[in-house]
Image: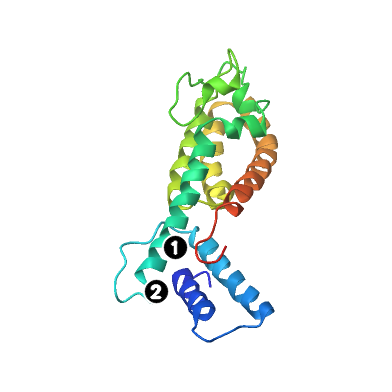
Amino acid sequence: MKDKPVEVYAIALDLLRAPGNILPRDVARGVEDMARSAARNSLLDPPLGIWTTEMNIELDDYNRFTAYHFRCRGRLLVFLVTGDTVKNTGTDWVWFNTRCGVCPLTLKSIVVPIAVLGKGKYPATWWVKYWERIVTSVGDSPCEKPFIDEAIWNTTLHALAKKCPTCHEAAVREFPLFREKLVKMVTKIIENVRIPCVD
């Protein structure tokens, strides 16, 4: 199902819409769940390209399927750059309170709502770079995947370890807690996005 979400979604819709085919309620629920899972799995990869006649899905269904991907992306991007992330995870993390004197701070950012941090608080530049990678990755995979991607975080941590052992130690300790909170919020946002033709 993860390899071919469009095809699985299309098959599920065909089963649900088959003329004269009245599925038992529990079977219909199972088929709906299959369509939901296929749509959800499509979020792991970049949005699909332009529809072609070779695809095993009707154009209208394909458009609704890809629109789901874009709605998820839109909701996550709004969450990430408007300050809701900071409001919901808190501002007590080392990257918002570095006083080491080594880590440069970012005074302005397009993707980090600095004003939400409070007067005189500025994020560490290394964290802003991490967050920029997250925001970019969500454009392709609007789901939990970018947030649990060890490569993104490890690149940030590796760069930080070279510059500031104090913040590095605190970040290693705090980041798993931050990520856990964040993934729960992302899951909740995605679960509230309607999956077309099923919900």
**Residue bearing mark 1:** 65
Label number found at residue 139: none
**Residue 57: horizontal and vertical position, in percent?**
39, 74
Q: Can see residue 103?
A: no
Of pointers 1 and 2, the one earlier in the residue sequence: 2
Q: Are marks 1 and 2 in contact (CB under 8 Å)?
A: yes
Residues at marks 1 and 2, CA–CA distance in whole angstroms:
10 Å
Q: Is residue 13 above or below residue 157?
A: below
**Residue bearing mark 2:** 57
Give the structural element (helix, strand or loop) at label 2: loop
Q: Nearer the viewer, residue 103 or 12?
A: 12
Taking the image as shown, residue 119 lies to the left or right of residue 131, namely right
Residue type beneath disc 2: Ile
**Rendered residue at 44%/70% (across/down):** 6
The residue lying furthest to the bottom in this view is: 20
Residue type beneath disc 1: Phe
Q: Is residue 139 above or below residue 165?
A: below
